[in-house]
Structure formats: structure tokens, C-alpha cells
Image (cartoon, helix red, strand yellow):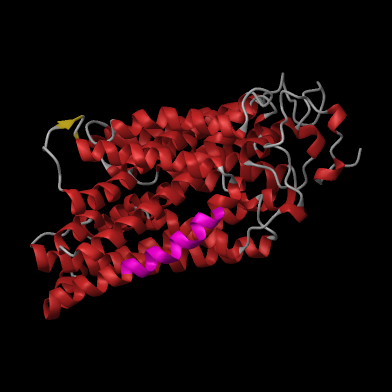
Amino acid sequence: MRERETTSDLDIRSIDPTLYNDDLAPVKPEARSWGAFEIFNVWSNDIQSLFGYTLAASLFLTYGLNGWAVMAAIILAGVVVMFLVNLTGKPSVKYGIPFPVMVRASLGVRGANLPAMLRAIVGIFWYGVQTYFASTAVTLMITAFFGAGSGSTFLGLSGVAWVSFLIVWLFQIAIFWQGIERIKHFLNWAGPLVYVVMLVLMGVVWYQAGDALLPAVGTIFSGSGESGGGVAAFFAIVGTMVAYFAAVVINFGDFTRFVKSERQMKLGNLLGLPLNVAFFSFIALIITAGTLVLFGEALTNPADIVERVDSLPLTIVAALTFFAATVGINLVANFIPPAYDLANLFPSRISFKLGGLITAVIAFFVGAFWLSFISQIGIAGFVNALGAIVAPFYGIIVVDYYLIKRQRLDMQALFSSRPGSAYYYTNGWNPRALIAFGVAALFSLSTVLVPALSSLDGYGWLIGAGLGGLLYFGLMRQRA
């Protein structure tokens, strides 16, 4: 039987309503409006968020590695992520389907709910964390105008911080409710504007630091990375940065389904990943060195930096733009994917918008407990642990599409639960994929949580993805 490869080929009368709704349906080529600029801004907002800046700046300080080596590791991570997302993005450019539908080909039409739910959990966690970080920018702006308030706190947050958190939480829901096109427009101005503000902030810090700035940069770049430990630290940085992007890497098809062509996707990834990450990390480095000169300590949170620079106009502009960038990536990377994933559970009952509301409600409590509890885990460990859980699905998806399915999917079968259909497997589940995931996830997560495997810290995502793909390939070849 001929494979159905386009939306127009779908026979709506024969699809299973428990697997289909308008939000999960393939996007027709003529309905797609995203290009390279939109993809570039997905990555721009990601690394330019307050959380992303803090992570990038802290990498120059926490590993005791030569600054040039840190920069090279960050660039290499950008290249690796670009390669990874080109692979996961291509199927959705071709077929116009989101991640939870794409993964049905490998996990089964019912089994796809497992990776979708785990990915939703990761997204909801990130959504809550990023909502908190965006709220710190609003707190900074409110404090600049009205002061810090009484100083009393609840769960580590002051009254002003709680008001700011609620403002950001409600604002994100309002943007999301207006649809993907409104989110696209939001990203398209937020990303470039943040670059302008970061350059201005770098200029202000450089001006105030004067001739002492370059020696401070030299201090950061003077670490020795020539020992074996230096090599391990280098690849740990690569792994940590890859893990930071992991949530977007796996479900990149949620965005590329709106892209006009594969060429546009690849161009956006090139500009948005290695080139963008390198440039932004350089800015973060200069500003961090400047804070060492000006304040006697290296500050990695831009909100803290702007506060100490003590310029009301700069505070207002910086707060607004960092708020916009953090909200932008939160909507794209941490709101849209869980909304699709939750809709995939019960398509006839949960729409894309309802999935988003469920995401927002749960994430509210994650963000509320971030400062008092969740952040105590540590940023690098938090990133690696969350990424490691879903990492094997990346390897399974890529191996299945490129090596098992040979880049051809039966679109009708993706929405069919008829026994014997292409992706029904065993009662809608692919046992071999589940075995591959379970073994790989157990190992990759243990690299983050088990002290005896601490030498592999930072590699959890890459190990999990590679092991998941290898196990899946071996098991599926046995089936053939």
C-alpha cells in the first residue's frame, strides 16, 4: 500500500479519534510561515534568557579551565546541538507533525504517550524555573521605581517578588492563548533587542572598569587546562551545554513543522547555535570580567549586574528585554511542547490550549519552590538530571527514522490503532523501544545521581541518547 505523506492524503474517516485532533494534525506546506529568522530567534531567546546567561557565565568560573578552552567547549557544544536538531527537525519539516505524533513511529501509537509525558514533565519543570527567572527581571524594575518593600519573605520570595512572579505567569498565558503566530512575533523582536541591551551593558561595564578590564579577562583566561582533568572538564562543559538545550533537541519538530523548508531550518540552526552561542558567550565573559573589577566579585546573574550598575534607564530597559527573552523561550521550549504532549494523551478531550493551561498551573508550584528548594540541587546537576531522563528517546527517534524507516512514514498509520497497522506493534506499544529506553535511561541518569559515576558528570544526556539509539537498533534488527 502506498505510504501517505501529506496532509491531503489523510483519510479523516478512517483515523482513530483518540489519536487525532486539529492541533496534532499535519501542517500543510502552504500554511507554514516560519523561516531561518524564526528558528534563529528560538535559539537566541534560549541562550539569552536569564537562566541561559547565568549558566554560560558560570562555566568560565566553575571548572577552573583556561578561558579559551571554555569558549571552545561552548562552541563545540553549539555545533553538536546544531547537528542533533538538524536530524530531529527534518522529519517534521517534511511531514508537518509535532513530536508526540512523530514518536509514534518508534514507540507505537499508544507507547508514544510515555516519551510525551516524560517530555511534558521536563517542560513543565523548565517552565516553572524560567518563569521564576523572568520574574526576577520584573522584580528589579518594580524595585527601581517603588523600592523593595518591607523585606518579609515567604518561600524565599519577597512581596514584590511574588507580585512579579504572578505578573509573568499571567502574561505568558495571555501570549500563549493568542496562538503560535503571536508567539513568533514576540520572539522576532525579543531576540534582537536583547542583543542590543547586552552590548550596551557590556559597553557600560567596560567603560566603568577602564584599563583594568583586560587584565581581569586575562585572569579568567589564565587557568591551566593541560592536565587530564582539564580534558575531562572540557568535555563536561560540552555535555552540560548540550544538556541545557536537550529539552528543545528532542521535540524540535514541534517548531520545524511550521518551517517552510529544510534549508531554512538548517540556516536558522547555523546562525542560532554555534555562531550565536559563541558571540553571546563572549559578551557574557567580558561582562563577568568587568564585574570582577567593579565589584570585587564575578557576578553571573545579569539582574544583579544591572542592579549594581545603578542606572535607572539601563535598569528599566534591561529588565524589560531580559523579561521578554526569558518569556519567549519559555513559551516556545517549555509551554508549547507540554501542551502538545498533554493533548496527545486524550486528543478528543484535551486541546492544545487546555494542555497549556494544565502546564501553567503545575509549573506555578515549581517556580514558587525554585528558590527555597529546587535550586539547592545546583544548576548543572539540575540540567543534567532532567536531560538524562529523556535522552534515550533522541537516539531511538533518530535511529528509527533514518535507519529503520529509511526516512519514510505512513501518515495514515500514525493516526490508526487498527491491529496490524504499521505502528500498532503490540497493543499500540513497541516493547523493544521500551527496553532500549529503560536500560539507557537508567544508565544515563545514574551518571548524574550515583557518586561512583561522578567522573561522567556532564555526559548523561549524550550517553543516554547514544545508548538508547544503539540498543534500539540492535533490538529492531533482531525483529527484522
Q: Is residue 142 left or right of residue 216?
A: right
Q: Residue at x 72, y 46 (%)?
A: 27
Residue closer to the observer: 417 or 165: 165
Query: Going by the picture, which residue comes out furthest to the bottom?
Result: 211
Q: Residue at x 72, y 18 (%)?
A: 427
Q: Residue at x 49, y 28 (%)?
A: 358
Write down the region rendered in magenta.
184-198
- What is the x, y in percent for residue 371? 24, 36
Query: Going by the picture, which residue comes out furthest to the right?
Result: 1
Report if residue 466 is visible in the image: no
Q: Residue 23's quadrant in the figure?
A: top right
Residue 467 part of the magenta segment: no
- What is the x, y in percent for residue 343? 61, 30
- What is the x, y in percent for residue 329? 45, 50
Residue 188 part of the magenta segment: yes
Q: Residue at x 37, y 61 (%)?
A: 74
Report if residue 456 is visible in the image: yes
Q: Residue 394's quadrant in the figure?
A: top right
Dividing the image into 4 quarters, which one contains the N terminus? top right
- What is the x, y in percent for residue 81? 49, 55
Dominant secondary structure of the magenta stretch? helix
Q: Is residue 95 left or right of residue 359?
A: right
